[in-house]
Amino acid sequence: MRVVIALASSSRQLSGVQRHAINVARCLLTTSDVSAVHLIAAPWQQEFLEDCVQDSDGRLSIHSAAIGESALSRNRWYYTRLPQLAAELKVDIAHLAYPAPVKTKAFPCPAVVTLHDLYPYDIQENFGFPKVLFNRLVLGQCLSGVDAVACVSHGTLSRMRHFYPGLAEAKAVVISNCVESYSAATGDSSFLKTGEKPFLLCVAQHRRNKNILFLLRIFKRMLSSGQLSRETRLVIIGIPGPETKRILHFLAAEDLTSNVKLVSGVSEAELQWCYRNCELLLAPSIVEGFGLPIAEALLAGCRIICSDLPVFREVGGDHCRYIPLGSAAEQAFVDAICHALSQPVPAPVSLPQLSASVIGNQYMKLYQSLQLQERRGCADLRPASMQDTQRKA
């Protein structure tokens, strides 16, 4: 089987979507049924993509998409050029790493999209008005145009069922993100000076759903009360976004610039070093689609305190401290942090269900069912095990 994975986006730094696409490729390469995987990224994404992949497998190829930096250029490329590339590369499956405009029937093969979340509906502040309306339009058009939707969690599937019940029933399956332990986490970080510990960690883009200002209020409160030493740092790793100005204003107003480090563009090794050396991971998100930092922190043996979201429980199980985001949430987070810091550091948690081989096999079953559907014209030939999974969710 030959697969093309399109991940071209405006992002100039490694984000969750790009990491997902790279991991899908890696998962597929664990199966003997795959003869070629083509990753297509924007020109400005080539460097970090090649750094992340570093795979000697001859079946993997990296391509540069001839697109401009505007949203219009990018959307036009997905709508017109991607189907042409799928034909030129003679692939059996076209996989979009995130929702983008799809020209129905233009693909010479089945098309799949990964659905990470329903943010255009669940948290409009991430986009602003009227941009959110365009995002909703693209999302709906894409879900209607593809042959299958791979939701990264049961929580995401549940939200799709709420907003697109018919499409969810006909097209959606749950295939989680691949998350595996990373061995090369030795050395040090480039953004923390020697001895600049202890530090708390938050891995989050500067977007409203990540609730970073809420976290900063908690951190300021604990420093002021002496519940955290003045030497304690808060490291926030994530791409700048709509909330960046508000975050910077808060840091300046509350005199936190020396205690809070905003970091982006870190290497995989540096990120894993942070997981393994931080005092704890904090994830106070309002809404999420999966919870990748939760899974990565579990694998690294990290204390975790997070908001009480179904998707976080789906990933974290009994290994995290969950805090409801109600009126008493700030105090509850403070109490949970104090308690966690008094406890031993937990052992790393094994997550075999998120391994490359398991996820790779799930994608292969989906792809093969789509090929069979294309040949026979059947209404729903998703693997029986996946259909059962959706009914139970």
Image (cartoon, rainbow, N blue to C red):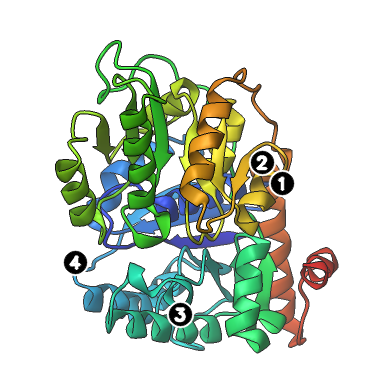
Q: Look at discs 4 and 3 and give the one toward the viewer.
A: 3
Amino acid type, callout 4: Glu
Q: Earlier in the sequence, mark 1 or mark 4?
A: 4
**What element does badge 2 sit on?**
loop
Residue visible at 38% across and 50% down in the picture: 214
Q: Quadrant of the C terminus?
A: bottom right
Q: Which mark is residue 69?
A: 4
**What element does badge 3 sit on?**
helix
Label 3 belongs to which residue?
139
* CA gap, disc 4 and disc 2: 34 Å
Q: Is residue 374 visible?
A: no
Label 1 belongs to which residue?
358
Amino acid type, callout 2: Ser
Q: Are marks 2 and 3 in contact (CB under 8 Å)?
A: no
Amino acid type, callout 1: Val
* CA gap, disc 1 and disc 3: 28 Å
From the viewer's perspective, is 82 left or right of 74?
Answer: right
Q: Nearer the viewer, residue 55 or 183?
A: 183
Label 2 belongs to which residue?
355
**What element does badge 1 sit on?**
helix
* CA gap, disc 4 and disc 3: 20 Å
* CA gap, disc 2 and disc 3: 28 Å
* CA gap, disc 2 and disc 1: 5 Å
348, above or below 78, in the image: above
Q: Quadrant of the N terminus?
A: bottom right
**What element does badge 4 sit on?**
loop
Q: Nearer the viewer, residue 143 or 135?
A: 135
Residue visible at 65% across and 43% down in the picture: 316
Residue 22 in picture, x, y percent from top left: 47, 48
